Image (tube, helix red, strand yellow):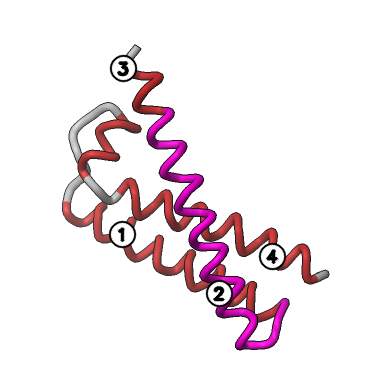
Amino acid sequence: MSDGAFHGLALVLAIAGMAAFALSLDAHWRQIARRRPPSGLVRIGLRIGGGALQAGAFAACLAADPPTMAVLVWTTTLTIAAALVAAAVTVQARLSAD
């Protein structure tokens, strides 16, 4: 795979991980799922899955770049993913309020 493909994979994994982290919070779960928050076990699973996805994003960055650069690219990717998920949750909340 090319470096660009690994970076794209890292972004997709980071977005999925941030979405899992967001859904593990009661407020975001209610905004997205429109029902009772999940049980503690589901919440733990979402957090573990989010962490695993973030680790996968880091592995994809390591596959594309040397370790020192991979850390920089990974943190930038996490920042972009967090901003995108925060925007998506905000837009979803505003659309559902109307």
Residue 88 painted magenta: yes
The span picked out in magenta is 64-91
Q: Nearer the viewer, residue 32 or 45?
A: 32
Label 2 close to label 1 by CB (< 8 Å): no
How far apart are the two marked residues, 4 and 2, measured between alpha carbons? Answer: 10 Å
Under circle 4, the secondary element is helix
The residue carrying mark 1 is 45
79 relative to 60, above or below:
above
Under circle 2, the secondary element is helix
Q: Amino acid at mark 1?
A: Gly
Residue 63 x %, y %: 69, 79
Residue 81 x %, y %: 51, 54
Residue 38 x %, y %: 21, 44
30 relative to 14, above or below:
above
Residue 7 has which mark?
Answer: 4
How far apart are the two marked residues, 3 and 1, measured between alpha carbons? Answer: 29 Å
The residue carrying mark 2 is 58
Q: Seen from this angle, which residue lies furthest top?
A: 98
Residue 12 has which mark?
Answer: none
